[in-house]
Image (tube, helix red, strand yellow):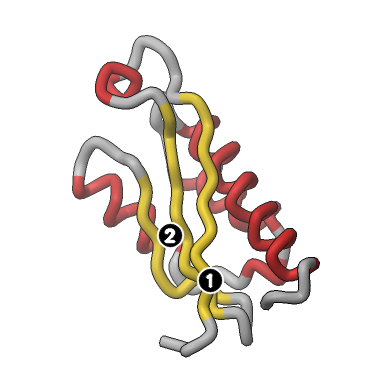
Amino acid sequence: MSDKTVLVSGYAQAPKGTGMSEQMTWVGVVLEVNCKDHTVVAADGTFITELARDFFRRRVVGYRLIDGVEGLVSVVDMHYSTPSKNALMVALQAAFQRYVEFRQAGKG
């Protein structure tokens, strides 16, 4: 991993009436991004199961944020069929926006 990485996160309200909302109020994602090539090098999320966390990691690690948020959200849209899908997409958009703000501040 690069010496120059940044950690960004995003959150969205967990969908009501789901197992996720019973255990947590928010869906959260955390991305470690290489600032040189804008690639997600590590990822985690507030999922109930390890399988869901691993599935999320495998889908987003390697994605280049410089390619835009649409592709990242599309990955979730195409590969998730869960009640938390929309909340996950909102959380990813928020994390992406934090990365954009980080770069605009001249830090990345």
On the image, the x and y values in percent for residue 71 come to 65, 57
Query: Would you name the residue on which mark 1 appears?
Result: 6
Q: Is residue 16 above or below residue 44?
A: above
Asked where in the image residue 30 lies, by quadrant, the reply is bottom left
Amino acid at the residue labelled 2: Arg
Point out which mark residue 69 bears: none
**Which of the two residues, 64 or 82, is positioned nearer the viewer here?**
64
On the image, the x and y values in percent for residue 69 come to 68, 55
In the displayed structure image, the side of residue 22 where residue 107 appears, left or right = right
On the image, the x and y values in percent for residue 41 come to 44, 74
Q: Is residue 30 above or below residue 65?
A: above
**Which of the two residues, 78 or 93, is positioned nearer the viewer here?**
93
- Residue shown at 69% from the left, 65% from the top: 102
**Which of the two residues, 81 or 13, is positioned nearer the viewer here?**
13
Point out which mark residue 59 bears: 2
- Mark 1, secondary structure of its residue: strand
- Residue shown at 47% from the left, 68% from the top: 32
Callout 2 crowding tier (Cα within 10 Å): few <14, some 14–19, many ≥20: some
What distance separates the C-alpha of mark 1 from that of mark 2?
19 Å
- In primary-sequence order, the first of circles 1 and 2 is 1
Question: Do the CB atoms of the residues marked 1 and 2 lie less than 8 Å apart?
Answer: no
On the image, the x and y values in percent for residue 81 come to 42, 33
